[in-house]
Each structure stands twice: as structure tokens, then as C-alpha cells.
Image (cartoon, helix red, strand yellow):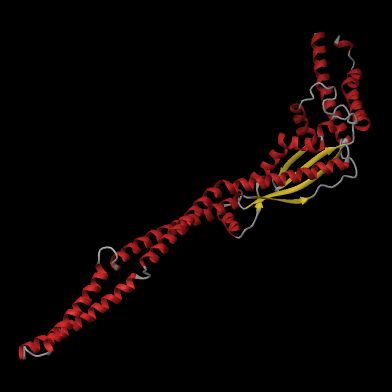
Amino acid sequence: MLKKISASKLFIVLVVVPTFLGILYNLVIATPRYVSEAKVVIKSLGMEEMPGGLGSLLSAVGVLQPSTSGAYLVIDHIYSRDVMFQLEKKFRIKEYYSHKDWDLLMRFDPFNLDPSYENFYEYYKSKVVESFLDTNSGVLHIRVRAKDPDYAQTLANELIKISEDFVNKINERASMTALRYYKEQLENSKRKVKEFSEKVKKFLTKKKVIAPEQEIGVILSMVATLHSKLIEKQIELSTIMSVAPKNPRVPELKREIDQIRKEIDKLLNKLTGKENSLATHSVELELLKSELLMLQKEVEMNLAAFLQAQNQAYLQHLFIETVEKPIKPDAPTEPKAGRNIFVIFAISFAVWGVVSLLIAGVKEHMEE
């Protein structure tokens, strides 16, 4: 059997026929495909690729740098079922890529063996969209293939819009997760300060005091003055009593001394009484002030935590910038006929060479 296989026939079967079929498909049968490409850059202040010191410096001055992790998140989203169904709902891409205008190799499920969305999802990832990151420049490429230039451009524009919406949702989640909690804490502490301030206001209004410390000082000064006056009157009374006990001035001095003592007692009672004394008011007011100060410090702490969370969320924000918008291609760029034909020929020639050597070896063994 092997002896009947000539080298020329083997060359025709393994090289000429596959190369001819490749030429036939690429130049005659294959549906011309238009490719619309967009280029975007995903940036952030996170600086995950930058050295620590430089990253901190650039972050401090607000310099955005390409975010590799953010770019890969966008790529994964573009290849997701969610995006495929969004495009399907708006542009009916499954029907479009199943149309008979496509050649059999490029058409989705040409023999209607498995028209499921799971099967179309694999087709979508391999033949409809292509997205990759140029790690040297940080540019994210988004490509769409279609048999119509307008359709390719429309899908590419839609993918940019979808990517922008996705980035915005990521930013919103990054902001709201921690910020919602710290904002609630801040608002709660502000509310407590406001309520307690009203309590202090009512206390001052009810007790009819504004600055008890100042009033205490004034009263003590008055008491001291009265004490000095009392001592003067007592000295005068003692002097008169020692010289002329029946002096008509004596009863008058005694009345004045009694009056001064009553005034002193009245002032001291106001100062140190049990319920409505200034001393009591002063202590209560100091306690209220201390509690209010603690609540104010709580507000400051919650504000600092909120600002820190806000700053952290901002550092996690992603920013998408379109470097090159999708253009409407004016000529099909696929299939790349010359390259494809050369690859088919090279592989076929290599296979022919290996098979020829194997057959020659078998023939030589059989002749022995």
C-alpha cells in the first residue's frame, strides 16, 4: 500500500490541495470583515505600579497614572455575558452573526446544531470582540469585527459607553461602601451636639444665669467689701463702748452692724445655697460644658474618619480616557489572505516533509 504512494501524489494531497483550499477560501469564499478599533486608557491615583515614594508624591499632587488592574477589570467586563446580553438586547448580535451572508467558517452555528446563548458566548469572545492591554503604553485596545463597517463602528462605540458606565459603577461602589457608614456616624454625632446645645440653652434660660463664674466673683467681692465695712463698724462700736457706753451712737451702730450681717448672709446663701445657688449652677454648667466638649471631639473624630475614607475612596477611583475613538473602516482588513495562505502552505509543507520521511523509513524497513 505504501509503495503505491508516490512522492508527487503525497505532495499534491498534503501541500497543493490544502494550499488551494486556503486560496479558495481566503480569496473567494471568506466574508470580508471590517474591524473598528478603539483605544482607551484606564487611570487611577492608586499607583499600584509605581515605587512607594514616587507613587505617594504623584498621588499627593493629583497625577493620574495608567492602572493595570483597572484595565484588566474592564477587559473582563467586555468579555462578560452581561455585556454580550446588553449588545444582544440593543443590536440583536446573535441574529446578525447568524446571517447567511457570513461564510460557513465565520457564521455562528451554520448548521443550527447548538443555537444556545452559551455557545454564542464562546463565539462572541473568539470572533466578535477582541480586547487586550498594551502593557508598555498602558493603552487598552477594543476591537469589533463585522461584515458591515457601520455595524462594527456602532458596536465599538457601544463598548466604550458600556466600559465608562462600568468604571462609574466601580467608583460609586468604592465611594458608598465605607463613606455611607462614616457619613452616618458624622451626621449622628452632629445631631447629638445640636440636641445637647439646646439642652444647655434651656438650662441657662431656666436658671436665669449666663456666666455663674463671673457672678460668683462679683458676690465674693461684695462680701469682702461688706466684711471690711462690718469690721470698721465693730471697731467703732467697741471704741465708743469703752469710752461712753451710753452714747446715743451705740444703738445706731448696732443696727448698722446687724444690717450688714444680714446682707452678708443673704449673699452667702445665694452663693452656697442647696438648690438655686450659683455654686450649684456653676457645677452643673461645668458638667454640661464637659459633656458638650466630648461630643464636639466626637464630631471632629468622625469628620476625620469620613475625610480619610473619602480620600481612600478617591484613590481607588478609576478614570477612563478615550485615546482613539472607533472609526468607520473604509476597507475590510480580514481575512488576511496573504498571511493565511502562507501559514497554510508552511504547515502543509512541514506535514508533507514529516510524512514523507516516515513513509521513506517504513519503505526502507520493509525492503530489508
In the rendered image of this protein, does residue 203 appear above or below residue 64?
A: below
Q: Residue at x 76, y 51 (%)?
A: 323
Quadrant of the image containing the C terminus: top right
Quarter of the picture containing the N terminus is top right
Q: Quadrant of residue 238?
A: bottom left
Say if residue 221 shows up in the picture.
Answer: yes
Residue 9 at what x, y percent from top left?
91, 18
Residue drawn at 23 percent across, 81 percent down: 225
Find residue 68 and report its horizontal and vertical position in percent. Answer: 65, 45
Q: How many marks?
A: 0
- 290 versus 357 height, above or below: below
Query: In the visual, does 325 lie left or right of 45?
Result: right
- Res. 80 visible in picture: no
**48 left or right of 246?**
right
Placement of 14 over or under 128, stated as above or below: above
Q: Return the x and y of residue 66 as percentages of the image width and height.
A: 67, 50
359 or 273, which lies in front?
273
Which sits in the foreground, 54 or 161? 161
Task: Give the image location of residue 314, x and y in percent.
Answer: 60, 53
> Seen in the image, is 235 located left or right of residue 347?
left
